[in-house]
Amino acid sequence: LKLQYIDMIDMAVQSIEQTKSRASDEHKIRLQLISSDKLGVQADKERIKQLLFILLDNALKYGRPAPQGEITLKLDKQQGQVMISVIDNGEGIASEDLEHIFEEFYRGRHRSSANTIAPIIGTGLGLTIASAIVRAHNGAITACSEPGNTEFKVLLPCAD
Ligand code: ATP
């Protein structure tokens, strides 16, 4: 890892812009800042970019399509940790899939890909890579989901 100071707000703004450029115009994609503190982490910039890409890409792929589709990237500070969460309002993750999604090559079953903006193809590796990146930074990643609300939450040690 090439560790350096990263301002997570700057990085989140960039990731949101990149996601918007891949989504439709009516898609609501927003950044929500809960904490007014500085949100810096000591981390590998390329890896954190990939982490956000994987989570936002899944939110686009499995989330609701526009115009009802909404994706929120939320940043907060909790007990000395930066919390990054990615929330979508798609069909959600079935409870029998939820315990396996971080396993390599595991892919969930989806009712229909006609309901999502991007075709549902993939390798089942995205979340395995995301969790390896988080672990390498001594952080934690969790998912919780119900129909219409899926949230991936990442905690990373705060550098400020
Ligand atoms: P790839 O990584 O190549 O894009 P993938 O999306 O299938 O493939 P993961 O990112 O590891 O792989 O996700 C594993 C599974 O978790 C997916 O197949 C999907 O069923 C489920 N999943 C992940 N994110 C979401 C989400 N936001 N909403 C609903 N299901 C999700």
Image (cartoon, grey):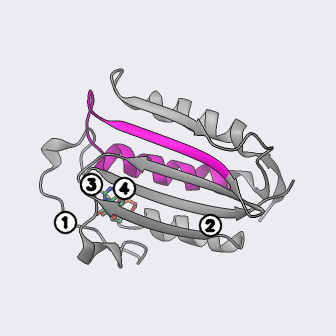
Mark 2 is surrounded, within 10 Å at the Cα level, by few (under 14), some (14 to 19) or many (20 or more) other residues, namely many
Q: Which residues are magenta?
A: 47-76
Nearest the camera: 155 or 103? 155
Q: Quadrant of residue 158?
A: bottom right
Lower position in the chain sequence, tag 3 or tag 4: 3
Check disc 4 and report the residue beneath it: 150
- Mark 1 CB in 8 Å range of ligand 1? yes
Tag in front: 2 or 4: 4
- Label 2, label 1: how far apart the Cα atoms are: 25 Å
Mark 4 is surrounded, within 10 Å at the Cα level, by few (under 14), some (14 to 19) or many (20 or more) other residues, namely many
Lower position in the chain sequence, tag 3 or tag 2: 3
- Mark 3 CB in 8 Å range of ligand 1? yes
- Label 1, label 3: how far apart the Cα atoms are: 11 Å
Mark 3 is surrounded, within 10 Å at the Cα level, by few (under 14), some (14 to 19) or many (20 or more) other residues, namely few
Residue 133: assigned label = 2
Lower position in the chain sequence, tag 1 or tag 4: 1
Counting the numbered discs, the total is: 4
* Element at label 2: helix
User: For this view, does 112 lie left or right of residue 4?
Assistant: left
- Label 3, label 2: how far apart the Cα atoms are: 22 Å
Check disc 3 and report the residue beneath it: 121
Residue 152 coordinates in the image, percent (x, y): 47, 59
Residue 92 coordinates in the image, percent (x, y): 27, 57
Residue 149 coordinates in the image, percent (x, y): 33, 52
Residue 41 coordinates in the image, percent (x, y): 78, 55
Check disc 1 and report the residue beneath it: 109
Lower position in the chain sequence, tag 2 or tag 4: 2
- Label 2, label 4: how far apart the Cα atoms are: 21 Å
- Label 1, label 4: how far apart the Cα atoms are: 15 Å
- Mark 4 CB in 8 Å range of ligand 1? yes
Tag in front: 3 or 2: 2
Look at the image and say whether residue 88 sits in the magenta stretch: no
